[in-house]
Image: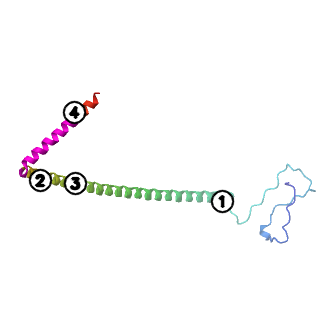
Amino acid sequence: MATDPVPEPLTNQEVREENRAGFPVVTSSASGDIRQMPPALPPADGQPSTSSKMDEIKSRVSDVADRAQQTASQIKDRVSDAAGQAQKTAAETYEKAKDGAARTYEQASRRTAEIARTARARSRQLMHDYPFHVIAGAATFGFVLGVALRIWRSSRYE
């Protein structure tokens, strides 16, 4: 309870005199009104007042807030720089990929044109060297195609 005396330290605990409580100890034999306020503590000599402590705390909080704001600003700048660098790298990579795709397309286009030119020249050479063979091959191809179409149409309408 609030009226119990402050216990003495155990024998293995050392208590320096400046750490001892300076409050008067109320014993159970004390007569008086419990509802009465205890006497005010005397101001400690050399100790700053409560208002100066509050001002000091406010200034510390303000300093911490300023440092936090500076840190947040630095982090924001770093993130902005990193995002800019990433965007620049992405744009460079895109340009390289675009150039590589254009180069590959040009190479494929040239190769296809070369193959088509070679095939055309070879077919002209074959037509010049073996005209009857080419005519017989075309006739055979037409005949086989006609028979296949006739079979296909007759099986469709049955």
Which residue is the site of mark 2? 122
Q: Quadrant of residue 146?
A: top left
- Frontmost of labels 1 and 2 is 2
Q: CA distance from mark 2 to mark 4?
A: 33 Å
Which mark sits nearer the N-terminus, 4 or 1? 1
Q: Residue furthest top?
A: 158
Q: CA distance from mark 4 to mark 1?
A: 108 Å
| Mark 1, secondary structure of its residue | helix
| Mark 3, secondary structure of its residue | helix
Which residue is the site of mark 4? 150
Please state which amino acid type lies under the numbered disc 1: Lys
Which mark sits nearer the N-terminus, 1 or 2? 1
| Quarter of the image where the C terminus is located | top left
Proximity of marks 4 and 1: CB atoms separated by less than 8 Å: no
| Quarter of the image where the N terminus is located | bottom right
**Dominant secondary structure of the residues highlighted in magenta in the image:** helix
Which residue corresponds to the image point at 23% horizontal and 56% vertical from the top-left? 103
Q: Is residue 131 magenta?
A: yes
| Mark 4, secondary structure of its residue | helix
Would residue 104 be found to the left or right of residue 89 on screen? left
Which residue is the site of mark 3? 108
Q: Residues within 10 Å of mark 1 (few under 14, many from 20)?
A: few
Please state which amino acid type lies under the numbered disc 2: Arg
Which mark sits nearer the N-terminus, 1 or 3? 1
Which residue is the site of mark 1? 53
Would residue 122 be found to the left or right of residue 106 on screen? left
Depth order, front residue of 4/115: 115
Q: CA distance from mark 3 to mark 2?
A: 21 Å
The magenta region covers 128-149
Proximity of marks 2 and 4: CB atoms separated by less than 8 Å: no
Would residue 24 be found to the left or right of residue 141 on screen? right
